[in-house]
Image (tube, rainbow, N blue to C red):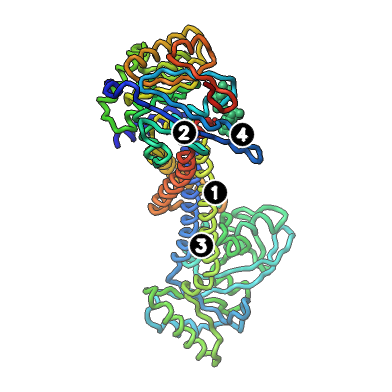
Amino acid sequence: MGKAETRKVGYTMIHTENLSKTYRMGDVEVQALRDVNLEIKDGEFIAIKGPSGSGKSTLLNLIGCLDTPTSGAVFIDGIDTGKLSENGLAEIRREKIGFIFQQFNLVHTLNAIENVALPMFFAGVGREARIKRADELLAKVGLGDRMYHKPSELSGGQQQRVAIARALSNDPEIVIGDEPTGNVDTETGNAIMVLLEGLNREGRTIIVVTHDAEIAAHAGRTKRMRDGRVLD
Amino acid sequence: MRDKFLLAFRSIRERKARSILTVLGIAVGIAAIVSLMSVGYGMEEAITGELTGMADMISVMPGEIRAHSYVEKGSFTDRDVSDLQRIGGIKDISTMTYDAAEVEYRNKRAPIFVIGRDTKELESFYVVPVGLKEGRWLRENDYKACVIGDRVANDFFDEVIHVNDKLVINGDKFIVVGVFEKGDMLYSNDVDPHIFLTLRAAKEVLQTDEIKYIIVRVYEIDEAEGIAEEIEEVINDNHGLDDFAMAMTMGSMIEMMGDIFNIIRGVLVGIAAIALIVASIGIMNTMLMSVMERTHEIGVMKAIGAKSSDVLSLFLLESSMVSLVGGVAGCVVGVIVAKVLSFLGSTASGLEIAAIVKPEVLLAGIAVAVIVGVLSGFYPARKASKMSPVEAVRYG
Ligand SMILES: Nc1ncnc2c1ncn2[C@@H]1O[C@H](COP(=O)(O)OP(=O)(O)OP(=O)(O)O)[C@@H](O)[C@H]1O
Ligand SMILES: [Mg+2]
């Protein structure tokens, strides 16, 4: 997992320039994000807090290349993502970023190990290698004994662990979680944060949105958002 | 590639209910095409088959068809018949006479058409296809015997007539030796309302030597047209008229019925077109539904790094597998339905209809299933794969 460790200390992994997103629904415009300038260093663990509707998910989706901004830019590992093609963006999502959703979003027809192997399938990794790595990752998140269970046969916390293992599938430098603890109980939430801390110690850059101050305490730095802006 | 197949297969299997519904939706449409076409071909074949069985026949009538109705100009003579025997290529000549007669049964009278003709000819003409319900067919040496059609037996008199009952025809007593089955579409007008006698008895009871109809059978069907022209010439010469006789080959009768065949074909094509449209709409609907409800899944796949083309190829593979299974199942069901329909149709109409399953119809059915299935799966899959991952994930 040493990709990140070869970089200089203080290297800027992610930064945004006047990042804005406006949703338009008929005549109504919602400015979900206004001129956000944010810099995240390589190996940082940053938590983002803020009231509901302040634009946290919008920001994460843009950083995670799941959506495109109305104006401004997102740079990831020095790459201006606005200049990438559809397939270029898919490659960033696949290789550089692991995204963890509040709703887990596992593919419910596939079992745990297949879900974890799916990003490697899209990366063209061979079958044997996929299974070997998915096996290791599930063991790492503590689900070595649940590999062949369907999502519907797993608890919320277990599903989220599968989702974390899936996010690590292609060994990304960045792991993004949008309220990864939002749908699990406090205890499981803490366990998940401990897992994320471990990933951070491996050198990965972690960005997590949370409402919970206790959860945010796991992070090295906390940013607050309000009305589409990141406060200092 | 093998992995993709496995993944597509997994997805089909895990969504059992939805996949079965989709396969069913496709199968129903294809079954409709296959069964309707097969029954249609069977019907066409049944009708042409009945007619081609009579292809060696030339009908000779003393008159002509004017403005769609037959105008009689007299009758043939024994000399006409003996002159015809000198024309080459003729296998057999039989004459027929017919007229309305007054028939009495248990004090009830009715005018009925009486037909007299060579018994062997009549037998191959009517008894073989229609069949007798009671009794036996006429023999050449029968004298005061008759065989009656279904409506004569059941409808024309107050009481039903059976074998061994006696009828009075123009004052002469006849014994009923046989009763016909009810004739099917092609035969009901020719058999059901008539009484059949030997030629000798008919001439006597109708008090006529007139020959109203000559049926000629030829050895070579190819020569029938030429022989028919010769027949007309010979008889016209005898009667000193240009257009006394009309000799029609079965071929030209079929041609006259060409309209009917064009209508049958038109109906067939129409049925196929409707079945095709119905099937296509059904397939589109099921495919659209089954792919659209997976927009969320497409979004998830894209969010974890799948390219649009990855997602699209997975879904196309899946829909072509489902469509193929649906198409094949539809063909199987369609063939079974066609057999059942043609059996029911035969029973109802009395016409022997055997469904004809043409391989090209089966292939076309499967092709329609796969092409329509894949195309209608392609559209929503492409639409979903073009959405931003957030948008697609939010869906559903
Ligand atoms: N697809 C969308 N269409 C229209 N408006 C949207 C859409 N997504 C978000 N918004 C709006 O943008 C604003 C920011 O939404 P966002 O989801 O980023 O908030 P959030 O901080 O994540 O809130 P929460 O804590 O409830 O998840 C909100 O006012 C929301 O209503
Ligand atoms: Mg949110």
Crowd class of label 2 (few under 14; some 14 to 19; many from 20; radius 10 Å): some
Relative to B241, is A1 on the left or the right? left
Nearest to the eye among marks 4 and 3: give it: 4
The residue labelled by disc 2 is A17
For ligand 1, tell me if the residue under mark 1 lies within 8 Å.
no
Query: What residue do we see at 61% from left, 84% from top?
Result: B73
Under circle 1, the secondary element is helix
Nearest to the eye among marks 2 and 1: give it: 2
Under circle 2, the secondary element is strand
Relative to B298, is A142 on the left or the right? left
| C-alpha separation, residue under disc 2 versus residue under disc 1 | 55 Å
Q: Amino acid at mark 3?
A: Arg
Contact? badges 2 and 1 (CB < 8 Å): no
Q: Are marks 3 and 2 on the same chain?
A: no
The residue labelled by disc 3 is B265
Under circle 4, the secondary element is strand
| C-alpha separation, residue under disc 3 versus residue under disc 1 | 20 Å
| C-alpha separation, residue under disc 4 versus residue under disc 3 | 62 Å
| C-alpha separation, residue under disc 3 versus residue under disc 2 | 71 Å
The quarter of the rendered structure image containing the C terminus of chain B is: top right
Q: Tell me the subunit letter for badge 4.
A: A
Counting from the top left corner in percent of width and height, residue A177 is at 45, 21
Counting from the top left corner in percent of width and height, residue A96 is at 35, 28
The residue labelled by disc 1 is B278
